[in-house]
């Protein structure tokens, strides 16, 4: 029996919005490849690999295309869960819905994104019995009519844009050491033990995240939002969890895939390079090409 999801996928394939195939590949952990095309000028690919930790995969991602209010939208996101994967999974299923429900997304973009992030975090905290006390970082990107790019994030998953071969970071790494004053003003503290990274209340290595009920009084979920125009100098964008950025700089990432025309292969190459540099985290990556 053909499902509604299968019918929608076939319609998108026929319309040229996505490819007709996807593949699972192996390695050190299970990788999942998806490849798709929005139009002749925009394509995207993604890749995920399970890290060496014994817990289940905690990374989730979104790559989607929607037509909303006469706008063509490319929707992309990386969610890197911690203390469980339920919050990241909830974000995968709900965050963009909340963003698109904001009626003023087009006119007051930054305010609309921030309201949607706040509403989603409140829903997660209300569902703590079902979702647990864990949390997740997030980086989201909305491509509007292949021309306007809206990036938002909480935590240390990152968005990097390549323009004429130069890397530009669009997101903000929310490190506890950088937001120590704000954390302390809420009654929390930032630990800085030898051999470890700074942590909120000695626990969490990011200063902003969704969920984390036990830390929320000291932890922010307000995103940084960046709006950019895609022009003839814009080559591609990378979204990735911190398993890449811990071992690869922004410029190294851009240079390593600049001449890889297939977006899926580019995402896989970045993850393979991170693994070769001894990254042991769960890793997820999306590459969106504009040429």
Image (cartoon, grey):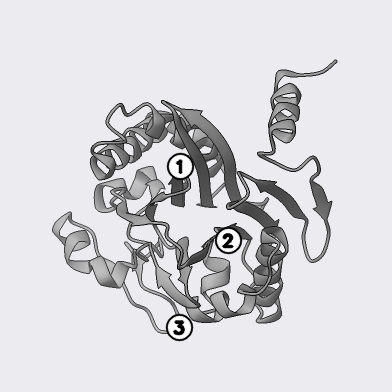
Task: Find disc 2 in the rendering and name its residue.
Answer: 291
Q: For the residues labelled 1 and 2, say whether their Cβ atoms are less than 8 Å apart.
A: no
Q: Name the residue under label 1.
A: 145
**Residue at the disc numbered 3:** 195
Distance Cα–Cα, label 2 vs label 3:
43 Å
Real-space CA distance between mark 3 and mark 1, rounded to the nearest whole angstrom? 46 Å
Front disc: 3 or 1? 1
Marked residue nearer the N-terminal end (2 or 3): 3
Q: Which residue is drawn at 38% across and 63% down?
A: 170
Earlier-in-chain disc, 1 versus 2: 1
Which quadrant of the figure has residue 50? bottom right
Q: Is mark 3 on a helix, strand or loop?
A: loop
> How many angstroms separate mark 1 from mark 2 (CA)?
15 Å
User: Residue drawn at (37%, 26%), measured in percent from left and top?
Assistant: 101
Please report the residue visible at 59 percent of the width from the left and 47 percent of the height from the top: 60
Which tag is nearer the camera, tag 2 or tag 3? 2
Identify the residue at image location x=37%, y=66%. 173
- The answer to whether 59 appears left or right of 237 in the picture is right
Q: Where is residue 225 in the image (x, y as percent from the top left)?
A: 31, 53
Verify CB contact (< 8 Å) between mark 3 and mark 1. no
279 vs 35, left or right, is: left
In depth, the one of 193 and 148 nearer the eye is 148
- Tell me if I can see residue 52 in this picture: no
């Amino acid at each position: 029996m053909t499902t509604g999801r299968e019918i929608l996928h076939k319609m998108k394939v026929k319309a040229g919005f996505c490819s007709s195939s996807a593949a699972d590949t192996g390695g050190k952990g299970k990788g999942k490849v998806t490849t798709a095309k929005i139009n002749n000028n925009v394509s995207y690919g993604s890749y995920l690999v399970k890290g060496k930790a014994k817990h289940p995969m905690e990374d989730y991602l979104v790559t989607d295309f929607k037509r909303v209010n006469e706008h063509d939208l490319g929707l992309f996101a990386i969610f890197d869960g911690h203390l469980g994967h339920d919050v990241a999974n909830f974000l995968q299923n709900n965050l963009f819905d909340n963003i698109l429900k904001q009626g003023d997304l087009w006119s007051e973009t930054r305010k609309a994104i921030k309201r949607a992030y706040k509403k989603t975090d409140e829903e997660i905290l209300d569902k703590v019995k079902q979702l647990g006390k864990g949390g997740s970082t997030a980086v989201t990107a909305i491509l509007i009519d292949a021309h306007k790019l809206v990036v938002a994030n909480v935590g240390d998953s990152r968005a990097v844009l390549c323009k004429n071969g130069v890397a530009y970071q669009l997101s903000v790494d929310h490190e506890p050491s950088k937001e120590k004053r704000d954390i302390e003003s809420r009654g929390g503290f930032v630990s800085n033990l030898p051999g470890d990274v700074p942590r909120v209340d000695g626990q969490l290595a990011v200063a902003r995240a969704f969920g984390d009920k036990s830390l929320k009084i000291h932890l922010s979920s307000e995103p940084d939002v960046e709006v950019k125009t895609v022009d003839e100098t814009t080559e591609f964008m990378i979204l990735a969890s911190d398993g890449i950025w811990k071992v690869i700089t922004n410029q190294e990432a851009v240079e390593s895939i600049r001449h890889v025309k297939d977006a899926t292969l580019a995402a896989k190459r970045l993850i393979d390079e991170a693994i070769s540099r001894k990254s042991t985290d769960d890793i997820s990556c999306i590459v969106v090409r504009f040429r």
